[in-house]
Image (spheres, rainbow, N blue to C red):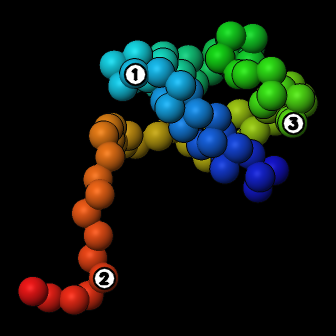
Amino acid sequence: MKNFIPLLLISVSFLMSACGSGEANKIVDEFHQKLDAKEYDYICDNMLSEDALEATSREEWMGMFTTLDSWGKLKKRKKQSGFSSKTNNGIKR
């Protein structure tokens, strides 16, 4: 079960990298809307790639969604987009 969260994040990241940022944001918004509405069948049928379903069975995905649901309602979701190339290596100029 602990492997599901990283797999979910990888799946969402893949969706974002496969599309332009505008399209990716629409997909992410739709995913979270379906997740909030507990439409897990829709997510499995329409939003997961074949690779995701081959790596993790539908039953395991549904179990992961049930586990997420048991944690309670999400209180805050922060939308982030874009990339940052800023680094901090501790050296001051």
Residue annotated with mark 2: 89
Q: Is residue 67 left or right of residue 34?
A: right
- Secondary element at tag 3: helix
Q: Quick one: 80 or 65, which is closer to the camera? A: 80
Residue 21, given in percent of the width and then of the height, sits at 36, 25
Mark-to-mark CA distance, 3 and 2 = 37 Å
Above or below, comparing residue 50 to residue 76 in the picture: above
Residue type (three-letter) at the residue carrying disc 1: Gly
CA gap, disc 1 to disc 2? Answer: 31 Å
Mark 3 surroundings within 10 Å by alpha-carbon count, few (fewer than 14), some (14 through 19), many (20 or more)? few
Please give the residue where the numbered disc 3 appears in the rendered image.
Answer: 55
Q: Name the residue under label 1.
A: 20
- Residue 36: tell me if it is visible: no
Q: Residue furthest left?
A: 93
Side (left or right) of 77 relative to 56: left
Quadrant housing residue 47? top right
Q: What residue type is labelled 2?
A: Asn
Instruction: Determine whether label 1 and label 3 are within 8 Å by CB.
Output: no
Q: How far apart are marks 1 and 3 (CA)?
A: 26 Å
